[in-house]
Amino acid sequence: MQDHRIPVFTHDEFLESYTKDPAAAPGRLEAIRRAIADIAEFHEVLPASWEDLRRVHTERHIQEVIREGLDRVASLAAGGAVMAALEGLKRPAFALIRPPGHHASADSAWGFCYYNNVAVALEHLRHLGHIETAYVLDFDLHYGDGTVNILGEKGYAAILNPQTENRLEYLRLVEHDLGAVRADIIAVSAGFDAHQLDWGGVLLTEDYHTIGALVREACTRLGIGCFAVLEGGYNHAVLGTNVRAFLLGLMGAPR
Ligand SMILES: [Zn+2]
């Protein structure tokens, strides 16, 4: 069985170029929106609450983000992850958000990230008693150090960052790890910069479909939910197609 449309949580304010870094580049989110318009069911996000941010970040760090003038857009991104996570309990959902989050630690951030969107979302679910354990697949090109720092310390999440430049080995790693998952939810840090025409030069577009399908398979087997959150991906010419391929896999639909 396949889903007809996938819920996508986003906001027009993400279209604004809030900094000069490539995650904030003009046209980036538009490219994705265009590519997934016919398979997405768009929902407008609300900002994450102070309580949500404080479960993950120090007050000092939040004040720093406010001082940089980025609290509004970063809170909206974290809020989008929270909403996708809640919907993800029922059916696969995607947060089409920026700034990304996986390089944000409790008290610091780098790599175009400010708040750790995935960690904020998982902590929200845990606080409400929806989950006790979680599995995070981070297929962004870069190692999600912030997520590992935050969730590693909390101790309830297993995290996979496949780090290999061999494409087939990469897919084998993901398949093997997902095949052994024991968790109450799967969260995906979906960065598309490992693509062959992006910075990493490793994965093909069809591989994102494969990864999405593997996540869906694991969820079906375990009877659990999943959600995905946009991280990196910088070649606008292929980014939309890659997100689309991943979402179709997640929906149980052919490419
Ligand atoms: Zn990246």
Image (cartoon, grey):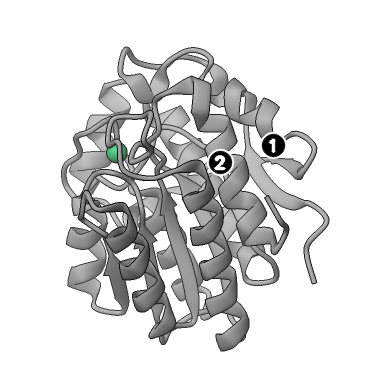
Q: Which mark is residue 195?
A: none
For the point 41% across and 34% down, which residue is it?
Answer: 74
Q: Viewed as shown, does residue 133 lie left or right of 155?
A: right
Residue 44 vertical placement versus 124 (above, below): above
User: Between 212 and 143, which is closer to the camera in this rendering?
Assistant: 212
Q: Residue at x 61, y 21 (%)?
A: 30
Contact between marks 1 and 2 (CB within 8 A): the answer is yes
Disc 1 is placed on an element classified as helix
Residue 66's quadrant in the figure? top left
**Could you classify mark 1 by the number of other residues whose Cα lies within 10 Å: few (under 14), some (14-19), or many (20 or more)?**
many
**Residue 172, image quadrant:** bottom left
* Kind of residue sitting beneath label 2: Val
Q: Which residue is mark 1?
A: 36
Residue 223: x and y in percent read 62, 85
Badge 1 or badge 2: first in the primary sequence: 1
Residue 158 seen in render: yes
Element at label 2: helix
